[in-house]
Amino acid sequence: MSHKVYFIECKQYIKIGFTTNTLKSRLSVIQAHNPFKLRILGFISCDCNRKAPPTLGNRLTCKKEAELHAKFLSNQIQHLHPESEWFEGTKKLRKYIDENADKHE
Ligand SMILES: [Zn+2]
């Protein structure tokens, strides 16, 4: 089943996650647990079988998500939770999003 790896911004941080739902509904769930305004920066559509070894946590996951978590691992915000999907919104990450992510569903 196709799914999306998304980039959601909160202040200086960016969450890299994946969803099989619409971005709007995923954003709504994350926003419900967050007091700050969130914004979708973009997404990448993926058709993998979601059986890739994860970079964070221990459940098999989306290959693209695992790849991106690994790519930006040195900027992961891990002091609050080891499996956090929040990353520093570095120039490198923002450039990657600009060059690789779609902006509109
Ligand atoms: Zn995938």
Image: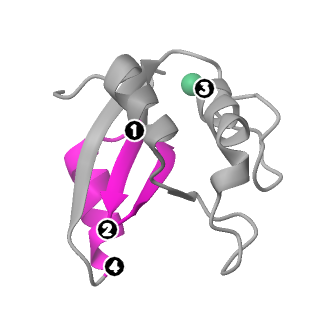
Residue that numbered label 1 is attached to = 94
Q: Mark 4: which amino acid?
A: Asn
Q: Which mark is residue 69?
A: none
Residues marked 2 and 4 touching at CB (< 8 Å): no
Q: Which residue is mark 4?
A: 34
- In three-dimensional space, the C-alpha distance between marks 1 and 3, rounded to whole angstroms, equals 17 Å
Q: Residue at x 48, y 39 (%)?
A: 93
In primary-sequence order, the first of circles 1 and 4 is: 4
Specify start and end residues of the magenta stretch as a single range: 6-34
Under tag 1, what secondary structure?
helix
Q: Is residue 87 magenta?
A: no
The residue where tag 2 is placed is 11
Q: CA distance from mark 2 to mark 4?
A: 11 Å
Is the residue marked 2 within 8 Å of ligand 1, measured from its CB?
Answer: no
Screen quadrant of the C terminus: top left
Front of the two marks 2 and 3? 2
Task: Give the spatial CA distance, label 1 vs label 4.
Answer: 21 Å
**Residue lying farthest to the left in this orientation:** 104
Q: Answer yes or no: do the residues labelled 4 and 3 have beta carbons within 8 Å? A: no
Residue drawn at 82 percent across, 34 percent down: 53
Residue pointed to by mark 3: 64
Q: Amino acid at mark 2?
A: Lys
In the image, taking residue 23 as reference, residue 16 lies left or right, namely: right
- Classify mark 2: helix, strand or loop: loop
